[in-house]
Image: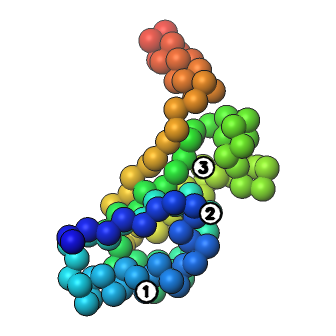
Amino acid sequence: MKKLNISGGEPFLKPDFIGEIFRFCKEELHLESCSVVNNGSKVTEKWMDTYGRYLDVMAISCDSFDADVNVQIGRSEKGTGNHVGRVFQVAEWCRRRGIEVKINTVVTRQVVSRIRIWHRDKMLT
């Protein structure tokens, strides 16, 4: 085994557990890469300070960078469109620590509609 990816549900519901798994994989098993897929809502800067050195890639789920679309499709934090801000906050914590960031998305009707509007507006300017 050379790489480990933890995903499914929300891995950061057990942050210390996954942190210790990453630590073990890097220090004891000498894996070349450890990654996690999450929605960003439970990641803390304290976790990043403690375990970030054992993480190579943080994939964050963000179905739209439009707050209204996230609320429409049920991808919001406590009914607000603040998820986008949270994604950027976690991405910045990763950037400061040299952790690669990937954004995962699900293409929905609402997202495609926003892309079409954006593209149309870009073509008109």
First of labels 2, 3 by sequence position: 2
Q: Residue furthest bottom?
A: 28
Residue beneath label 1, please?
20
Q: Residue at x 26, y 68 (%)?
A: 3
Residue beneath label 3, please?
84
Q: Amino acid at mark 2?
A: Ser
The spot of residue 118 in percent (x, y) is: 53, 22
Task: From the image, state whether disc 2 or disc 3 is nearer to you.
Answer: 2
Q: CA distance from mark 1 to mark 2?
A: 20 Å
First of labels 1, 2 by sequence position: 1
Task: From the image, state whether disc 1 or disc 2 is nearer to you.
Answer: 1
Q: Is residue 86 above or below residue 42?
A: above
Q: Amino acid at mark 3?
A: Val
Q: CA distance from mark 2 to mark 3?
A: 10 Å
Q: Residue at x 36, y 65 (%)?
A: 5
Report if the CB atoms under discs 3 and 1 are less than 8 Å apart: no
Residue beneath label 2, please?
41
Q: Is residue 110 above or below residue 77?
A: above
Report if the CB atoms under discs 2 and 3 are less than 8 Å apart: no
